[in-house]
Amino acid sequence: MDTRGRTLLAKIWDQHVIAHISDDTDLLHVDRHFLHDLGGSAGLINLKSRNIPVHNPELTFATPDHAISTASGRAGTIKTGWELLAALRTETSASNIRLFDLDQPGQGIVHVIGPELGLSLPGCLIVCGDSHTCTHGGLGALAFGIGSSELTHVLATQTIIQRRPKTMRVTFDGRLPFGVTAKDLILALIGHVGAAGGTGYAVEYAGSAIRDMPIEGRLTICNLSVELGAKMGLIAPDEATFAYIRGRPYAPQGEMWDRAVAAWRTLRSDSDAMFDREVSIDVGTIIPQITWGTSPEHVLGVDGRIPDPADIADPARRGAIEIALDYMGLKPGAPIAGTPVDWVFIGSCTNSRLSDLRAAAEVARGRKVAPGVRAWVVPGSETVRRDAMAEGLDKIFIDAGFEWREPGCSMCLAANGETVPPGQRSVSTSNRNFVGRQGPRARTHLASPAMAVAAAVSGAIADVRTMER
Amino acid sequence: MPQAFTKLTATAAPIMRTNVDTDVIISINRMIGNSVRGNLGKWAFGSLRYLPDGSDNPEFILNREPYRAAEILVTGPNFGCGSSREAAVWSLQEMGIRAIIGSGFGDIFFANCFQNGILPVVLDKAVIDGLAAEIEASQGAGRVSVDLQEQTVTSPSGVRHVFEIDPRRRAGLLEGLDEISLTLRRDHEIRAFQASDRDARPWIHFAGHQAG
């Protein structure tokens, strides 16, 4: 018998094995399945056409987030958005699946509402037809995105067949410097290991900077796991995790809570556990990050210069940088700070939680969005929206010239028609700066919420450290 | 039910840029709504394939002969990274692609390929670069063979490369197996697991909807 210590991944994985399919592939139990408007109804309709019932509707939860408008009253929702919502309502109702519908507490971006409702728990296996499902790993869950076919398989069987991934541990040690956030840590990591650095791995984030980090920051860290290629990212749950979950609507209560916490306390990698790859980052060296290109790995510190292809010897890398700079309309070798911006988007499953909006409001308070810049704040959920309004954050944003909107995915992926116009430049708190991601020919720079506000009020990419109070 | 894949000899198009993401493979605004299936092929690689006025971009490889008829893609590192959208695979399939040979793929895209009878083959980057160079030297005339039974890729000049593949994935593709039916045969095991897990982790298993 193997007596080596076990990783957090192994502990959660083994607890979900129903059957071994082959040497390294298992049939795993799915504890929570989240559906959204983009693909949820299609999976349910597919199943119905095959005359197969949903295996465990009580473990399945749905909400519209991708295709609905985030304008007041959901005005301007595109025709297909309404059709997808109608289908989601019909099909979830027919299968007795809980739907958190528009204007209800619980509605919001799937990766915001899961943790917020206490549905996503440590040790849970969570899937959703969305690659940013890795977000829930911030609570110590094993969570990953799946495709439409796998989604239908989960609906039919409450299981998923998975090959056990390799393991990587990323240790963030040290204290966060002034102006540096969870978003900057994970962007810096992606710059360090590359957009394929985590492919085939489940990544565990550890170290003193993670232990000191509030839960919402941990969700941001895990959210971008897929941008370094890792389908799964996770953080061992601790007292801060338990305090975050306690009392949430679907969290266990009373005696059940005590049993759950006792089990969750065992969910940590043993001190002698071995990982297939280890990466260490001293967070003291990180400064606020901003992307310059069309992959999240195209990232630099805000005091940096745009790369110059002439400096790159490898022709493939040089060519890739040339293509990215051409799309982004940037001058090689110029400082990234000072680049004029047209749009600012604060939102998405990466950075739309209450703490993100507080950090953004802190910079926005008493300042004005620069002339010619359109700036949006899209809260991650109905609950975040209400909580932020109770604190008066909406007023701070509106007074500063931001638009305060309804919850949803919005301009992160522009599935609802909310786009950055062609050729315009956006600073966005979302997760992908891909070609066309925020709209055809839109140019996206990823950054933290505070950095996004700094850009909005400066009219250009700016170093938030010169502005924070 | 996915179509089976056994062997294919066809025109192959190299798309060698790094990090071709699934947003680039299929734009979100082309994949939402009903009845998009069957109409995705013409929108694959839309931002590369078409100029802003909607006309074909003559520089994009899949707009050139003989690559228009390609059934195989030879791809650069991290092809299919990004979103989980299975429409990326559907769009490639609908434009006639049946196999993708690359040095690495996005994990979710890779899994989605198998679900649709598309074979993704991983080979060393040096092999991929050599394969692409051979195809380009023949201006696309040199055909590439992929044999799943033998687990080989054969270059236009006849160089054979053996590839590794998960045996379960291989069997699934060779026979076009339906995973849902296979798993439902194990439903007694699933239910037995749930029964014992209800004792071990009762907080996971809601008896009914307890909130709101």
Image (spheres, rainbow, N blue to C red):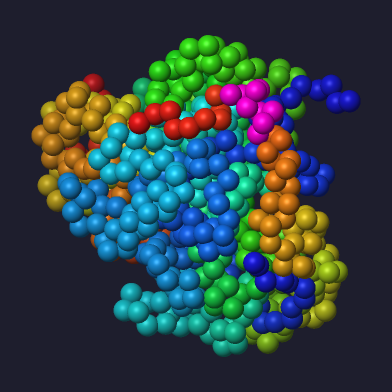
At x 15%, y 30%, the residue is: A396
| Range shown magenta | B194-202
Residue A405 is left or right of residue B79, and the answer is left
Name the magenta segment's main secondary structure. helix
Residue at the spot 32% in from the left edge and 61% down from the top edge: A83
The quarter of the rendered structure image containing the N terminus of chain B is bottom right
Q: Is residue B175 magenta?
A: no
Q: Give the quadrant of residue A1.
A: top right
**Residue B116 image position (x, y, % from top left):** 62, 66
Tell me, yes or no, whether the highlighted magenta stretch contains residue B200: yes
Whether residue A247 is visible, yes or no, is: yes
Residue A106: x percent and y percent? 34, 35
Q: Nearer the viewer, residue B71 or B118?
A: B118
Give how far across and how far down residue B67 sits, in percent.
Answer: 59, 83
Whole-percent x and y of residue A312? Answer: 54, 55
What residue lies at 83% left-to-right and 79% top-to-bottom? Answer: B158
